[in-house]
Structure formats: structure tokens, C-alpha cells
Amino acid sequence: MRVYLRSVLAALAVMLCVSPLAIRGQQPASTPPEPTPRLADGTPNLGRVPGEKGVWNVPYIQNMADRASGRGAGPAGRGGGGGNEGGRGGSRSEPHIPFQPWAAAVYDYNSVNNSKYDPEGYCLPPGGPRMMATPYPMEIVQLPEQKRILMIFEGATHIWREIYMDARAHPQGDALNPTYLGHSVGRWDGDTLVVDVVGFNEGTWIDYYGHPHTDQLHVVERISRPDKRTLRYEATIDDPGAYTRPWTVSWTVPWTPTGELTEYICQENNRYLWNLTDDHGQPIFGPQR
Amino acid sequence: MTKRMRFAVGVAVAAALLLTGVPAVFAHHSFAAEFDASKPFKLTGLVTKVEWQNPHTYFYIDVTDTATGKVTNWAMEMGSPNGLMRQGWTRNTLKIGDIVAVEGSVARTGQPLGNARTVTLTSTGQRLFAASSQAP
């Protein structure tokens, strides 16, 4: 371990001399951040600059409660933080999350079994804010002449989402078909892209830790690029079926200027499912033991 | 491998990790539901099979119990091929017949199954991070 630590320190020292800008997110104080790139009409460009590479390096956020407003200044509760090593405290450790009683009970169950039944473990996609919390690269492609924006996610299950920018309304009644990613309508509020999403099915969790939601979920996202290397993401989670009031989460997503998307087909060889057992120790998909 | 060599390899790996700027952790399923981080292992064995596939690359090693001579074939889980490639791996980094030392955590079920954090190629001393889904 000492050898490893010394190696890291030495590597850092070498890189600080050779290539100060190469270190992600650590620009010298004297260098101002590169400005927000813009399209010809002045709209913020949330994607690549022509002639350059680059992807958004989506962070791994396991527990949205740690990123929720109202958490207070103290350390993360036992419901969150601390990685995935256990020691999760469930709903009681998250007084700032407005659980309805049944949602608290489901969350506690997911806490006790270490998120064993997480749909992402089944290679099902994330929905809502979790798309921005599943740690694989992502690109945003703006098509202003077509009045739509695409977000392409390498990971989870190699998914894309389409944000309609043509001022349409959400489909009403049975015309709104519940889906994993929902129905997204966007507009610009100054330099911030505001996306209103409804029409979620109940096949996803809000996060890895297992905050539940219903098909009444309504998410409002606010996405901006304050400088070239930073995407700011905020989502208000409004689900009157599971929570007593809306709650808001936010974080930033760093830009990796050398990155490109690659293929990731999760369903190829998902051995986790073969070994998955139910609460009675019986295989869920494999033969009975 | 000498301490100096280990240090040099460590510098190279650490620099590569810092330069690539991608997360070292790639999530797919619940790590804690399948593996026990409080039960780390270090095993050396002969590679018998490699599955360079999503969502997790697996390789299999024959591990010989030095006391009894009994051979057990262990399955080792790593990250996805794209996660591993961003950390310097290729599909030919591990070959059948290679001898490797693996550090990681064992499965809760007691099966010979592990989640690899690092893999060291005995022939060259090269130590690679396995894009484990365990939180750092």
C-alpha cells in the first residue's frame, strides 16, 4: 500500500510538471475556465465543439438523498455516503426525504438487502435522474433545426432519450404510454435547458439505493453548462404517489475532452441473474436448489 | 519483482488512471448483495478461460491448495470491456495459460467466485485495476 501511495504521489508530481491541464477538474487557479461553447444562434452548446472529441463523464451517485437539498451541513447519513459496503440506515437516516409510509418501507427493504433486486442489475435501464447518476459516458446532441435534443448514454443499457423542443404538450390520458425514460419536453430558460418529464412506468428505481417511485412521477430537470468542462444538473422529483412533497437533487458532471462513446450491451452475459436468489434462498431465474 | 520495479509500474498505472479521467468504478449490479468486502482474498492461479463480455468480464483460474494439492476453478468478475479498455486492458491482456495474482472480495454464497480489484500478471509484474463495481 505504501508503494502504491508513493506511486500515486510521484505520478501526480510528474504530471504537474509535464501537463498541468491534463488533470481532470484541477485547473491552475491562474487559468480561467474555458467559456461555455455556443451554437451559431447563441444557444449554449451542451455537446462537442466541431473538430473536437469529448463526453460527459457521468458520476456514480448511489444515493440521491446525499445530493438532495435540505440535507444539512453534517456528514452524510447512514442511509447514504460510505460507498456500498453496507451499514445503510434506511429511511430513518434521511429525515429530509419526504417519504410516504409505504415508500419508506420499500426503501428500508432495499436498504436491508443491499439493493439486491435493483432493476439495473437485471440490465434494465435507469429512468429519470438516475440516467445522470449511472457512471458511463454520455453525449448531448442538439438538433435545433429539427427542434429536438438527443442524449446518448453509453451505459446502463446503451440508451438514448429524445427531448422535444417544439413546444408540444405531453400526451394526455391513455395517449401517454408509460415508459422507462418517460416523455420529455424541453425549453430554454435563458442559458438553462428545462426539461419536463412525465409518463414513467414503475420499472425503475430513483437511484441505486432504491428510493421508489410510482407512475405519477413528474421530473423537472434544469441543465446548464456554466463553463466548457462543467455540466450542472438539477432535478425536482415530484411523485405524489410516493412522497409527500417534491424534493430536489443536484450535482455537476465533468467533461472528458478526450472521451468517446463505446459499445456496452449489458444483456450479453449477465451472470448476476444466474446467481440471484430470492428471500428464501431460491434462484429467481435458475433451477431450484 | 523488485521494489523499484513495482514502484515504476505503480507510477505508470497511477498516471494512466489519472490521465484517462474516467471513473474507476463502473456499476452494474449491487456489489454488496453479491460480494463481501470484509472478506478480501489474494489468490494466484492459472487462467483457464476468459469471457470478455458485458456487463462484466469474467476470467477463470485454477487455484491449487498447497496443503492438499486440490485444484479449485475460481470465477473472477471484473468491469465491462469498455471500462477495462479505458484502464489499459485489451481482450488479449489475459490469455489462457497465464499465471495471475488476483486481489478482491469473495462471494457471499461461498462459491469459488470473486470480485477482482486488481490483477497482476506474474510473467511481467504488470498490475492492472479491474474496473471493479466495488466503491473505492
Image (tube, helix red, strand yellow):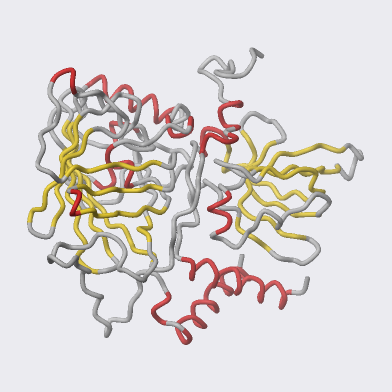
A218 over A258 or under it: above or below: above
Q: Is residue A197 left or right of residue B27?
A: left
Q: In this view, does A143 lie to the left or right of A274?
A: left
Q: Which residue is drawn at 64% across and 12% down?
A: A288
* Residue B122: image location, x then y, percent: 79, 61
In the image, A36 versus A287, the foreground residue is A36
In the image, A262 versus A218, the foreground residue is A262
Q: Which residue is drawn at 50% across and 45% down?
A: A264
**Quarter where residue B68 is shown:** top right
Q: Residue at x 31, y 22 (%)?
A: A105
B11 over A220 or under it: above or below: below
* Residue A231: image location, x then y, percent: 26, 59
* Residue B51: image location, x then y, percent: 68, 42
* Residue B31: image location, x then y, percent: 52, 39
Q: In this view, does A120 lie to the left or right of A7?
A: left
**Quarter where residue B55 is shown:** top right
A52 over B53 or under it: above or below: below
Quarter of the image where the N terminus of chain B is located: bottom right
**Quarter where residue A176 is shown:** top left
